[in-house]
Amino acid sequence: MFKNIPVIAIEEHYWDRELFSKITGQEGIRGDALLNRLYDLGDLRLKEMDEAGVDMQVLSLGAPGSQKLKADIAVDIAKGANDRLAEAVARHPKRFAGFACLPTEVPEAAARELERAVKHLGFKGAMIHGMTNGIFHDDERFWCIYEMAEKLDVPIYFHPSFPNKDVSALYYDKYAPDFPQVVRAAWGYTVETATQAIRLILSRLFEKHPNFKVILGHFGETLPFQLWRIDQALRRPGAAPMDFRGTFCKNFYITTSGHFSTPALIASMMEMGMDHIMFAIDWPFVPNKPGMDWLQTLQISNEDMTKMLSGNSKRLLKL
């Protein structure tokens, strides 16, 4: 509890051992201390939540999730991971909830798995990481997943993953040896995920599915701060009609994950309103304490604090 307000953190990660045994490359390599936390769905996680004052975590796979699995194994691996997460949530139902992983390499099966995860496992939506084997998720092959999410009235959380290897080579390789996080959280993740969100809107997905809801972490991957300029530029002569800002503010929700900045919060509140901002920490990639300490510095109303810490997530995720 924070000043008698329940604290629900909604971008808190874990790894599934079977799924990540199939992941190759840098995204499957983590230090021992981080791995201990990623694989823990019990005592260590709960201890650190209690020490910080976090009442509930909404659990989701860490990057790259299930988006790099090949079609021949993706469905079975994702189902198994979701079943195991559901068992962990059932052991601590007042402390944990879950986002499903989806076998997006097989979109129709992914839509069915989302339905199963929500209706039968009690999950609150799903998380998708980066691209599916190099394909952005605005591609219409994936729209059946969003149709199902709209039907179930659950959101999809679009989370970063590694940039496309050609983009990474052109943009980041020069500096990555000295500053490895420039490819990840420092900048590469933001560019990829913001681009994904922009493409979703430009695809006119939300015209066909006006009640589909998207969550973005890290204060919306900079998009709340760019809304005016993006919207104005897209309306210049010669462009097709597009209400980018209106769509973003209606259909998108953002979280504080790994970005404990008061100016970023105030800018987001002014652009989107507090009803679309939710608390997250990004554990264990970011420790609980910096996020909880940041809350102590905020000078916002009790009503707004309640919305951010748990009110909005309770409403959106039906917690």
Image: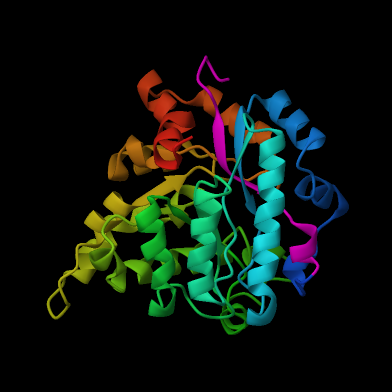
Q: Decide which of 185, 61 is in the foreground and name it.
A: 61
Tell me the residue at 67%/31% (across/down).
289
Query: Where does the image place residue 168, in percent across and percent down from the top left?
Result: 61, 78
Q: Decide which of 62, 299 is in the foreground and name it.
A: 62
Up-down: is 152 above or below 306?
below
Q: Give the residues in magenta.
A: 1-21
Left or right: residue 53 versus residue 317 is right
Is residue 159 visible in this depiction of the protein?
Answer: no
Tell me the residue at 81%/35% (across/down).
44
Query: Where does the image place residue 159, in percent across and percent down from the top left?
Result: 54, 59
User: Which residue in the rendered view is the most extreme toward the left?
Assistant: 237
Q: Decide which of 92, 189 is in the foreground and name it.
A: 92
Q: Dividing the picture into quarters, in which one does residue 128 lie?
A: bottom right
The magenta stretch spans residue 14: yes
Up-down: is 163 above or below 215?
below
User: Which residue in the rendered view is the most extreme toward the top?
Assistant: 4
User: Which residue in the rendered view is the most extreme toward the front?
Assistant: 120
Left or right: residue 268 versus residue 210 is right
Query: Where does the image place residue 32, in percent across and percent down from the top left?
Result: 87, 52
Query: Where does the image place residue 219, in percent across and percent down from the top left?
Result: 46, 48
Up-down: is 41 above or below 228?
above
Q: Dividing the picture into quarters, in which one does residue 311 lie?
A: top left
Tally of numbered discs: 0
Left or right: residue 42 versus residue 183 is right
